[in-house]
Image (tube, rainbow, N blue to C red):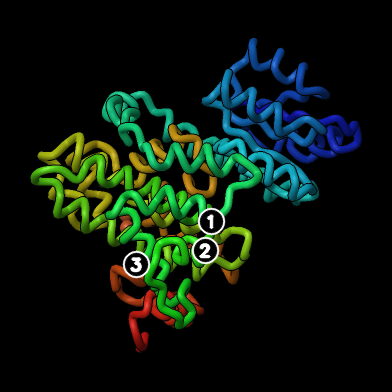
Amino acid sequence: MRVLFVEDHPEATHHIKKALTGFVPWEFDFAVTSQQAMALMANHTYAVMVTSVRDSVDLIRRVRDFHPNVARILRSAEDEDEARLRALFVSHQVVEADIELGKLVGVIAQAADLELMIHDEGLRKLVGRVEHLPSQPKVYARLVQMLKRSDANFRAVGQVVQNDVAIATEIIRVANTPFFSRGRAVTNVIDAVGRLGTRTVRDLVLAHEVFSAVATGPNQAIVEKIHRHSVDVAVAARSLVSRPRDRDDAFLAGLLHDVGRLVVVSQLPAASPVVDSDGDLELEQSVIGVTHAELGAYLVGLWGLPYSVLWAAASHHEEEVVGEGALDVAAAVYVAEQVLSEQEEMAVPGFAMWRQTAHEALGMGSAS
Ligand SMILES: [Fe+2]
Ligand SMILES: [Fe+2]
């Protein structure tokens, strides 16, 4: 594979070259400016781009538009860059500017694997039609527009969502989980939006519209079951994730982690029973040819959602995502899934405490 580094510090370039030459089985090129990077990309096929130049955010946006198969990694010391990327809704990864090179190699390898997986031709053919899913999420589109304006507030958002009874009911239900309610019951939708925050409401609406688009006829019961499970995983993952700034992504990742099961239910109804239980990936692989985790990651990638959400969808049945100590978005979703599916205890330190946290967030009573 071929990796492009876009780097304007000669010292850093030298350092990366020296550290990687002979140690990784990749070819790599260096560009000094984003113009040079785009010119190189026109002539070579890269699996991954790592950028740290001043206009990286714009470069990442252009790469998404013109070379969507290139995994994009931003090396940045600025929180502001990350915030701008999030606003763009670009699937990406951000690492610290001074990340250890050994770690960076791991991040690059993982990004390349995932990119390969979600751009696999067979997978694309199989789910060709899911690009139309959700069919016109109307309320979501209105909210996205509304939240772009600086004067957007929770009252205005509440007024939009209260017109849809099913969505309003769902928002009130989630606002009354102990994690959000903190012991005070919420009974109207405007207060519920105030409690949850506008981004969480927007994400709940997205999930609601995706799920209800496929909850028809014989699908209804299983789709509702998956929807309920997904909201529970979202609340639990949000309570579990270690860094407060990851909470919104953990919530969205929980909401969408099983969206691959929906694809199977709606596009391959004969295979529905295979995804009725959540997580028999070997069976899914043999019957469908792909797993719901791969399908979900593919779809989340198509929608251009944050990289951490995509990675969580891809890896939410892989115990390896739980490292030592802190829980990132994928690890939080994995643990939430384990707690809620009441799998046997995970043999990792901290599991009992995590289970307690998740149970408390959902109001499931004592965890013992
Ligand atoms: Fe799940
Ligand atoms: Fe799952």
Ligand 2 in which quarter: bottom left
Q: Earlier in the sequence, mark 2 or mark 1?
A: 1
What residue sits right under mark 1 in the picture?
A: 154
What residue sits right under mark 2 in the picture?
A: 194
Frontmost residue, 359 versus 155? 155
Frontmost residue, 161 versus 93? 161
Frontmost residue, 148 versus 318? 148
In this rendering, the label closer to the viewer, 1 or 3: 1
Q: Earlier in the sequence, mark 2 or mark 3?
A: 3
Q: Is residue 335 visible?
A: no
The local secondary structure at tag 3 comes to helix
Question: Is ligand 1 less than 8 Å from the beta carbon at label 3?
Answer: no
Residue type highlighted by circle 2? Gly
The local secondary structure at tag 2 comes to helix
**Residue at 69% of width from left, 45% of height from top?**
82
What residue sits right under mark 3 in the picture?
A: 173
From mark 1 to mark 3, how far is it between C-alphas? Answer: 17 Å
The local secondary structure at tag 1 comes to helix
Residue type highlighted by circle 3? Arg
- Marks 2/1 in contact by CB < 8 Å: the verdict is yes
Q: Residue 166: image x %, image y %?
A: 28, 54
Residue type highlighted by circle 1? Phe
From mark 2 to mark 1, how far is it between C-alphas? Answer: 6 Å
Q: Taking 280 as reference, is 121 above or below it?
A: above
Q: Quadrant of residue 352?
A: bottom left
Q: Residue 9: image x %, image y %?
A: 88, 33
**Residue at 63% of width from left, 46% of height from top?**
151
Q: Is residue 176 visible?
A: yes
Frontmost residue, 12 versus 17? 12
Q: Taking 234 as reference, is 85 above or below it?
A: above
Question: Is ligand 1 less than 8 Å from the beta carbon at label 2?
Answer: no
